[in-house]
Amino acid sequence: MINMPPNDNDLNAYVDRQLSEADRRLVETYLAHHPEVAARVRAWQQDAQHLRTALGSTLQQPANPALDPAMIRRRLNHRLRRHLASAAVLLLAVSVGGFSGWQAREMTLLRSAAPMADALQAYRLFAQQGVLPADYQTGDEHSMQAWLDRYFTQANRLPDLSNAGFKPVSGRLLSTEQGAAAMVVYQDPTGEKISFYVRPPGPKNFLLPRGSRRDGELQAEYWSGPGYNYAMVIPSDTPTTQRLKQTLNF
């Protein structure tokens, strides 16, 4: 049973022909006595008729194969496979190019970077200029070895330079891109300083062959042992250099 007077829901149901026979007669009786509501309902009925006509003409058109669900799915799958193939080709090109570029970059860096340049820089900053105080100071070789072993358990033993008149006096921890490094400074009775430097190997565990190079007033003797790279930094062209070469068999 509808409400009286009928509300908009009742009137819309009347327009859509969804009322029972008894309710339809009640609405028509109401509309006969309320012409302004009847005019609004007639406008709704005209709109509904126009919609039915438009839908009817569309449904009477011949079937469009392009709108067939199976055809749409095949089209989408084909497009997806094409996009995936394009993405795979692009990824392969980028990967090959990136890998080749990275390899070339690493090879260039390894060729262009001077061996153990950081050991020379550390010597200038901390042994020559004394920019920062040492992390550890001692006059005892065994104490210095114990300090170094706390951070580099597998590293080579500190060189014994007592025959050349040098003993370890201070140590400093440093940082590299590959991990922690350390520099141990030796000193002789005249105040001459040299350094022993240990650090992890470079990219791809790049170990060094035994070698020597000069950088200004300093000389670096470098080599590699199990898991680490090493360098002795000493003043170049001095009696100290000759004594150390004899002591360390450089």
Image: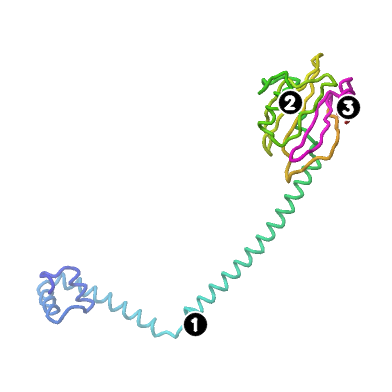
* Neighbourhood count class around disc 1 (C-alpha, 10 Å): few under 14, some 14–19, many 20 upward: few
Q: Is residue 96 above or below residue 205?
A: below
For the residues labelled 1 and 2, the Cα–Cα distance comes to: 83 Å
For the residues labelled 3 and 1, the Cα–Cα distance comes to: 90 Å
Quickly name the residue at label 3: 245
Q: Which amino acid type is shown beneath numbered disc 3? A: Lys
Q: Which of the two marks, 1 or 2, is nearer to us in this view?
A: 2
List x then y, in percent, for residue 195.
Answer: 77, 25
Assess whether mark 2 and mark 3 are in contact (beta carbons under 8 angstroms).
Answer: no
Query: Is-magenta flag for residue 86?
Result: no
Q: Which amino acid type is shown beneath numbered disc 1? A: Pro
Left or right placement of residue 93 versus residue 51 in this view: right
- Residue 184's tag is 2
User: In terms of secondary structure, where does tag 1 sit?
Assistant: helix
- The residue located at (47%, 78%) in the rendering is 69
Residue at the far front: name it.
Answer: 142
Left or right placement of residue 170 versus residue 30 in this view: right
User: In terms of secondary structure, where does tag 2 sit?
Assistant: strand
- Residue 194's tag is none
User: In terms of secondary structure, where does tag 3 sit?
Assistant: helix
Q: Which amino acid type is shown beneath numbered disc 2? A: Val
Query: Nearer the N terminus, badge 3 or badge 2?
Result: 2
Query: Is-magenta flag for residue 242?
Result: yes
Q: In which quarter of the image is the C terminus?
A: top right
For the residues labelled 3 and 2, the Cα–Cα distance comes to: 18 Å
Q: What stretch is highlighted in magenta?
A: 216-245
Quickly name the residue at label 1: 65
